[in-house]
Amino acid sequence: MQNTKPAFNASTSDTATIKGSFDWMIAVYLASPQFDDLPDLTQRSYRQALARVANYPLKDGRRFGTICLTSITPAVADQMHARLKSRSDGSKRARSAMLSMRVAQRAWSITQRRHMADMPPHNPFAKMGIVYRPAPTRPVTYQELLRFVAEADRTGDHSIGTAAMIAFFWLQRQTDILARLSWHHYRPHDAPEVARIFHHKTHELVDIPLFDNDGTHLWPELSIRLDMSLPRGALIVTRDHPDRLRKTHLPWQPDYFRHRVAGIRAAAGIDPQVKFMGLRHGGYTEGANADLTDAQLRALSGHRTASMVLVYAKASLQQRRDGARKRREAREATAGIAEGWERNHL
C-alpha cells in the first residue's frame, strides 16, 4: 500500500514530529552534539540509514517513523532488519540494512541519555547479533596507478591523477585529499622537506619525508608532479576547469569526483570493481610486499592499532624514511619507473 503521509526528510531534523515517535527520536539525534561532531560524509550516510527505517511503509499505510517507540520491540527490530536486507526489486543490500540498524541503535541510546523520562528503558536495536562480512577492497597496483594517472592527464583531469597518487603513496583518505589537503601542507615553511598529511579519522598528523638522507627523492613521481603544478587556490586538489559563474577552481564534490573516477577507470581498462579507496589499499600492500615492519608502515600511514607494537614502536621520521626507501626500491626492482622519472626530470 502506498504511503500517503509526508516522508521523513533525511537532510534536516524535523522538530514538528510527535513526541515519543521514531521520527521524534531521529530529530533529537540529528540535533545532538554527537551527530554534529561527525564528518559531513558520515552525517549524510547516517541520515540516509535512518530514513530507510523511518520511511518504511507499514501494512496499514503508515510510515514506520510515525509509530510510538514503546511499540518497537526487539522482535520488531529484527523484522525490520530482515525486510531492509532486500530492495523492492529483490536485490540484496545487507550492508545498508546493517548500517540502518547500527545507526538506529546509536540514535536510540543518545536520545535516551537526553530524554530518559520519554524513552523506553531498553534499546530494541541493541545486541541484534548482526554479522556482516564486507567484500574485501581490491588493492590497486602500481602499474594500474600509472595507467589511471596517464588517462586522467589525457582527459584533462590532472587533479584526479594527483589525488590518486596522494592516496597510493601517502595513504591519505579521499575525504581528506579533497577537502583538507592544502598547499601549506606540502613543504611547509617550518619543514620544507616533508609533506604534512592529516588523517581526520584518527586525528593523526604525519610528516612524510620527501627525501632520503642522501637527498634522493623518495616519491619522485608525486613530488615532481606537485612541484610542476600551478596552485589554483588553498587546496592542492581542485577541479581542473574554473566554474563558469564563479570563475574559480572549486573543490571536487564527492559524487562528481566519484563519477569522473569511474569514467577514467573505465577508459584506462581497469577492473570496474576497483574503487578509489583501493589506491590506499594498494599503497599498504606495496609496503607489505616491500617488507616494511609494522612500525614503519604505521609510521607512514598514521594508522592506530591495538597491538603491542603501538606501545613499543614509536613513530619517527627515520622509520618513515626507511619505509619510504624500501617502497621506492621495491618499485625500481620491478619496473625501473622511478629511476626513469629522475633521469628525465631531475
Image (cartoon, helix red, strand yellow):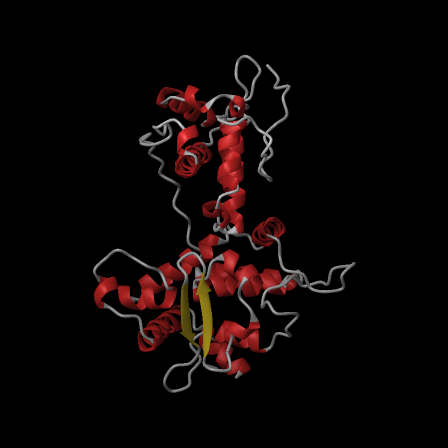
State the residue lying farthest toward the right: 245
Quadrant of the drawing holding the N terminus: top right
Expressed as whole percent of the image width and height from the top left, the position of residue 173 reads: 47, 58
Expressed as whole percent of the image width and height from the top left, the position of residue 43 reads: 52, 45
Q: In screen coordinates, is 283 left or right of 30?
A: left
How many numbered circles does the render carry? 0
Q: Residue at 36% x, 20% y: name it.
A: 75
State the residue lying farthest toward the front: 117
Expressed as whole percent of the image width and height from the top left, the position of residue 229 reads: 61, 74
Q: Residue at 45% x, 53% y: name it.
A: 278
Q: In screen coordinates, is 247 left or right of 190?
A: right
State the residue lying farthest toward the top: 60
47 above or below 156?
above
Q: Quadrant of residue 128?
A: top left
Q: Residue at 52% x, 42% y: name it.
A: 31
Expressed as whole percent of the image width and height from the top left, the position of residue 87 reads: 52, 26
State the residue lying farthest toward the bottom: 214
Q: Quadrant of residue 218?
A: bottom left
Front residue of this view, candidates 177 and 11: 11
305 above or below 169?
above
Front residue of this view, candidates 63 and 308: 63
